[in-house]
């Protein structure tokens, strides 16, 4: 397996930027998810890595070799990357065994070795009993496992997956998460996984690159994205909760900030002393009758074991968990603790604009 490196990578289609100055390093054996809304450039980054597109500028290195950029271009079939598509892309007239064996036939691997490697790939993906079936005789999840086995069998330098679970129903998606995790643990493959489903990205990846409008906004471990988002976009896109503007009023000896939220002083973790916003996750909210921040219940949904409430506090929508059902329209007290404060890069611009108007 090999590390993957993007350096100042940009791509334009007919002069319109789809990716802008992407810089990222993916370690050998790392599982990275590309997460972002439709049109943010995830698939374009994957296609550039596979060799289906040429970069407009910048370079891509795979395992230390330059595969694209600066006048170099290694074609897809020579990059040694495996690709798993949403549509499975299996040969319909070949059995499961023949589909998985195909990449080895193309590479002229001798039959005994081929048989051993196919058997191993089928065992790894739990498909040994299905070797003689045709793709039409398999479920969607089983077909996707064949695509995974076909990818794994030739020992690729990296595995690229483009929304591989998008065609499957919710229950099957959850069980496929375990298949992907197991696949990754056993093969130690370098994996680049495109999804717009944040649950999938946070559950599966070692690190997640959150993209928006052709740029990477934050590239970090799932728990860091959730607990320490760098800007309003990431805070709002990843995880549940609210993003509210807030100003600093003090600092504790433990380097916690005291910020003013809804007219109350609240302790916050932060990487800056000039925050513009706080991120309020459900875990930061305790509901208690005598708390000074008052919030009106907008909705109450039973999640099994607990209720998810949406609350209106001074015009902002908060999300909280409760052990008991709350009535819609009821007013509750909200206590905030352990928020995350950050400075949104856009905040300075907003301030400058409003000053200019004044
Ligand atoms: N071949 C192409 N020609 C012109 N524009 C393209 C082409 N491929 C992609 N684009 C544009 O580049 C931008 C990024 O597209 P891309 O498919 O990478 O987004 P994405 O994040 O994968 O979206 P989705 O989640 O909807 O698949 C979009 O604005 C898209 O319209």
Image (cartoon, helix red, strand yellow):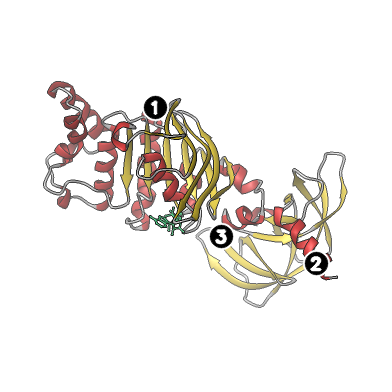
Residue drawn at x 31%, y 28% as measured from the top left: 155
Alpha-carbon span between mark 1 and mark 3: 43 Å
Check if mark 1's residue and mark 3's residue have beta carbons within 8 Å: no
Q: Callout 1 environment at 10 Å: few (<14), some (14 to 19), or many (20+)? A: many
Residue 6 x/y as whole percent: 50, 37
Quadrant location of residue 167?
bottom left
Give the alpha-carbon distance from disc 2 to disc 3, as whole Å.
43 Å
User: In the rendered view of the protein, which quadrant contains the C terminus?
Assistant: bottom right
The tag earlier along the polypeptide, 1 or 2, is 1
Please tell me whether mark 3 sits on a helix, a strand or a loop: loop
Name the mark nearer the viewer: 1 or 3.
1
Q: Is mark 3 within 8 Å of ligand 1?
A: no
Q: Residue at x 46, y 50 (%)?
A: 42
Q: Residue furthest bottom?
A: 329
In the displayed structure image, the side of residue 106 where residue 194 appears, left or right = right
Residue linked to disc 1: 1
| Horizontal side, residue 355 vs residue 42: left or right | right
Pointer 3 residue: 306
The answer to which of 69 and 197 lies nearer the viewer is 69
Q: Secondary structure at mark 2?
A: helix
Disc 1, SS: loop
Location of residue 298 in the rendering, given as x and y in whole percent from the top left corner? 62, 73
Q: Is mark 1 within 8 Å of ligand 1?
A: no
**Where residue 331 appears, x then y in whole percent?**
72, 73
Q: Which quarter is ligand 1 in?
A: bottom left
How crowded pointer 2 is (Cα within 10 Å; few <14, some 14-19, many 20+) is rated as: few
- Could you say which disc has been placed on residue 166 in the image? none
Residue for badge 2: 354
x, y (%) of residue 121? 25, 32
């Amino acid at each position: 397996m090999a590390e993957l490196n993007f350096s100042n990578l940009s791509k334009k289609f007919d002069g319109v930027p789809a990716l802008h100055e992407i810089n990222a390093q993916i370690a050998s054996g790392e599982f990275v998810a590309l997460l972002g809304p439709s049109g943010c450039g995830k698939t374009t980054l994957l296609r550039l890595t596979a060799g289906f597109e040429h970069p407009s500028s910048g370079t891509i290195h795979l395992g230390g070799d330059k595969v694209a950029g600066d006048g170099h271009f290694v074609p897809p079939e020579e990059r040694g990357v495996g690709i798993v598509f949403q549509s499975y892309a299996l040969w319909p007239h070949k059995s499961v065994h023949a589909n998985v064996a195909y990449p080895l036939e193309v590479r002229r691997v001798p039959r005994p070795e081929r048989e051993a490697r196919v058997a191993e790939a089928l065992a790894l993906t739990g498909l040994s009993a299905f070797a003689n079936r045709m793709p039409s005789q398999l479920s969607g999840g089983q077909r996707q496992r064949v695509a995974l086995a076909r990818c794994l069998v030739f020992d690729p330098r990296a595995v690229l997956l483009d929304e591989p679970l998008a065609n499957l129903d919710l229950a099957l998606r959850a069980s496929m998460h375990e298949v992907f995790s197991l696949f990754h643990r056993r093969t130690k493959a370098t994996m680049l996984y495109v999804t717009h489903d944040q649950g999938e990205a946070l559950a599966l990846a070692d690190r997640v690159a959150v993209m928006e409008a052709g740029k990477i906004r934050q590239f970090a471990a799932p728990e860091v994205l959730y607990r320490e988002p760098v800007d309003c976009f990431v805070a709002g896109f990843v995880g549940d909760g609210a993003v509210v503007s807030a100003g600093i009023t003090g600092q504790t000896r433990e380097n916690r900030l005291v910020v003013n939220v809804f007219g109350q002083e609240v302790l916050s973790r932060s990487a800056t002393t000039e925050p513009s916003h706080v991120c309020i996750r459900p875990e930061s909210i305790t509901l208690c009758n005598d708390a000074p921040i008052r919030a009106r219940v907008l909705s109450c949904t039973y999640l099994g074991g607990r209720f998810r409430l949406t609350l209106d506090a001074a015009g902002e929508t908060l999300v909280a968990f409760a052990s008991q059902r709350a009535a819609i329209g009821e007013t509750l007290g909200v206590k905030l603790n352990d928020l995350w404060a950050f400075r949104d890069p856009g905040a300075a611009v907003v301030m400058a604009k409003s000053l200019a108007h004044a």
